[in-house]
Image: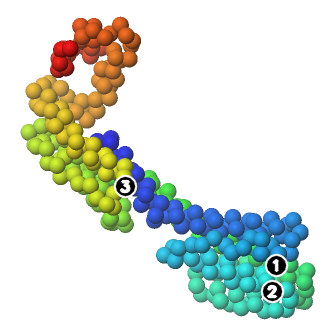
């Protein structure tokens, strides 16, 4: 089960990266580009030369709404920074501010912030340089306002995605509500929930209800990650071993149900004799140590060699 869950986690991370993190990286790259431009200006380079050094801002994908919006605004700001005549600059800046009206909260915040730094009287070159520097600061704030909701959604997705792995007996009313809400927002992830429930039947159902379909019904897919497909192949390859494990519990009904789902304690005890040294190479010594470690009878299934 752990092998399958690790494969599913790889797919969830891939989904999270595509849905949230890729756009976050684009917004972060835009911010870094502005930082580079600010550093050059701070070092004494004029805006025209600084723009030539930094070249164009990083590309973004059109399907990413927030980063696309930020990229479009960035190119408008670049055109403004290239203007050298104060009167023309402030005229075009006012056009930019007017164009931001009625679009959204972040645009409203930006327009209000830019109005506050506009000169009240004369349009001078000194005032233009001051406003250009402020414009870059406000642009980074604009990026941050668009990135923060994506950051929050990405973190929320990471926490809520864990409910996919809960078996029915561990699903409380609160977890059920989270699971329903999560799969409603991300319906394409229902297949992973169904997969965990299917394989979970091996440890959840009564032994008589386990007939092997829990493994045979698993199927690889081109949309799954390599890690998940590898996990599915491994589970199917060891189907006989897993079902033989089930038969063992049928033959030993006194063993608790908890031991079917978590044998880590017994696995560690079993491995200890083989990690103790070369003095345990003989069959009798290995069996003797195992009997002691596991406090029970151990059968030998290897060929006598």
Please provide percent x and percent y for residue 232: 27, 48
Please provide percent x and percent y for residue 153: 49, 62
Q: Which label lies toward us, 1 or 2? A: 1
Q: Is residue 104 left or right of residue 267?
A: right
Determine crowd level at label 1: few under 14, some 14-19, many 20+ residues with C-alpha closer than 10 A: some
- Marker disc for residue 83: 2
Q: What separation in Å lies between label 1 and label 2 (alpha carbons)?
A: 9 Å
**Contact flag, marks 3 and 1 (Cβ < 8 Å):** no
- Determine which residue is flagged by label 3: 225
- Marker disc for residue 99: none
Residue under the point 72% across and 73% down: 55
Between discs 3 and 1, the one toward the N terminus: 1
Residue under the point 79% across and 68% down: 38
Q: What separation in Å lies between label 3 and label 1 (alpha carbons)?
A: 46 Å
Q: Write down the quadrant of residue 187 in the picture.
A: bottom left
Residue 33 at least partly seen:
yes
Please provide percent x and percent y for residue 36: 75, 65
Between discs 3 and 2, the one toward the N terminus: 2
Residue 189 at least partly seen:
no
Q: Write down the quadrant of residue 290 in the picture.
A: top left
**Contact flag, marks 1 and 2 (Cβ < 8 Å):** no
Please provide percent x and percent y for residue 111: 69, 82
Q: Is residue 130 left or right of residue 288?
A: right
Determine crowd level at label 2: few under 14, some 14-19, many 20+ residues with C-alpha closer than 10 A: some
- Determine which residue is flagged by label 1: 48
| Quadrant occupied by the N terminus | top left
129 to 192, vertically: above or below: below
Of the pair 96 and 71, the residue shown nearer to us: 71
Residue under the point 17% across and 49% down: 216
């Amino acid at each position: 089960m752990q092998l399958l869950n690790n494969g599913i986690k790889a797919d969830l991370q891939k989904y999270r990266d595509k849905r949230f993190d890729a756009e976050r990286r684009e917004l972060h790259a835009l911010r870094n580009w502005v930082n580079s431009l600010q550093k050059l200006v701070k070092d004494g380079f004029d805006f025209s030369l600084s723009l030539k050094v930094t070249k164009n801002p990083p590309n973004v994908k059109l399907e990413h709404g927030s980063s696309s919006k930020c990229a479009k605004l960035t190119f408008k700001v670049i055109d403004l920074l290239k203007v050298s005549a104060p009167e023309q600059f402030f005229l075009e800046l006012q056009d930019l501010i007017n164009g931001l009206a009625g679009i959204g909260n972040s645009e409203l915040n930006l327009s209000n912030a830019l109005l506050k730094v506009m000169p009240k009287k004369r349009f001078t070159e000194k005032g233009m340089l001051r406003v250009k520097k402020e414009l870059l600061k406000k642009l980074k704030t604009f990026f941050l306002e668009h990135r923060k909701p994506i950051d929050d959604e990405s973190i929320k997705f990471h926490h809520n995605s864990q409910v996919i792995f809960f078996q029915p007996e561990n699903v409380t009313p609160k977890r059920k509500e989270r699971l329903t809400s999560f799969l409603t927002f991300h319906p394409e992830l229902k297949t992973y929930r169904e997969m965990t429930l299917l394989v979970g039947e091996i440890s959840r159902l009564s032994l008589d209800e386990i007939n092997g379909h829990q493994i045979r019904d698993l199927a690889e897919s081109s949309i799954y990650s390599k890690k998940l497909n590898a996990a599915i192949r491994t589970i199917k390859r060891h189907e006989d071993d897993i079902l033989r494990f089930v038969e063992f519990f049928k033959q030993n009904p006194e063993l608790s149900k908890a031991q079917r789902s978590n044998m880590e304690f017994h696995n560690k005890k079993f491995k200890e004799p083989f990690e103790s040294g070369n003095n345990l190479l003989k069959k009798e010594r290995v069996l003797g140590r195992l009997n002691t470690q596991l406090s029970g009878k151990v059968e030998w299934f290897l060929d006598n060699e």
